[in-house]
Amino acid sequence: MRIEVTTNSAMTRLMAYDSACKQRILFPDYEFDTCNSVFGTDYFMIGYSMNGKKNFQWFAGVVTEDPAELQEFKDVVAEKQGQRKALLYTGVSLEHAKKVANWLQKELGKKAALIYYTSKLEKNVYALENDFTG
C-alpha cells in the first residue's frame, strides 16, 4: 500500500506519536517487547505487547470521514484487535473520537475489547461504556 503525502497523512502520524506518549502515561510501568503497526494515508494502528505476540494494547486513529477509508480502517482494527483487551482510539477532536469509537464498538460487537477514546489535544482518556475519565 502506498501512503499519499497529504495533510491527513501528516495528522495521522502526529496522532500516532501522541498515542505513544499517552501509552506511557496510561501504563507507566508497561515494558513491551513487541510493537506491531499498520499505517494508511488516513489511519494508523499500533500495538504493544510485553509477552511476544499476545495481549497487545492497541492504539488507533483515523482522520477521514470517507466511507472507503473508514471501512479499510475498520477491517484493520477487526483483524488486529480481535478479542484483545483494550483499544484506545484517537480522533482529530474529542467529538470525532467518540463518534468513531461508538461506530467501532457497534461494528465490532459488544464482545470486542474495552474501547477508550481521546483526541490529539486532549489530556484525558475516556472509557466509551461509561465516559469514565482516566
Image: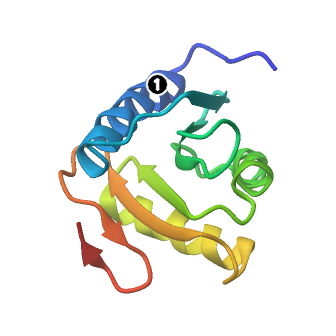
Q: Nearer the viewer, residue 111 or 42?
A: 111
Where does the N terminus fall, quadrant-wise?
Answer: top right
Indicate the quadrant where residue 22 lies.
top left
**Residue 85 image offset from top left, x and y in percent:** 58, 64
- Please give the residue where the numbered disc 1 appears in the rendered image: 13
Horizontal relation, residue 78 to residue 14: left or right: right
Q: How is the rendered protein coloured? A: rainbow
Q: Please report the residue visible at 21 percent of the width from the left and 58 percent of the height from the top.
A: 124
**Residue 49 image offset from top left, x and y in percent:** 56, 40
Indicate the quadrant where residue 52 lies.
top right
Q: Please report the residue visible at 44 percent of the width from the left and 84 percent of the height from the top.
A: 129
Circle 1 packing at 10 Å, graded few (<14), some (14-19), many (20+), is some
Q: Please report the residue visible at 42 percent of the width from the left and 50 percent of the height from the top.
A: 90
Count of residue discs: 1
Horizontal relation, residue 104 to residue 74: left or right: left
Q: Nearer the viewer, residue 82 or 104?
A: 82
Q: Circle 1 — which element?
A: helix
**Residue 28 image offset from top left, x and y in percent:** 26, 43
Q: Label 1 is placed on what type of residue? A: Arg
Q: Is residue 120 above or below residue 39?
A: below
Q: Is residue 41 above or below residue 87?
A: above
Q: Is residue 51 above or below residue 55?
A: above
Horizontal relation, residue 132 to residue 60: left or right: left
**Residue 65 image offset from top left, x and y in percent:** 59, 52
Where does the C terminus fall, quadrant-wise?
Answer: bottom left
> Which residue is most to the left?
123
Indicate the quadrant where residue 102 lies.
bottom right
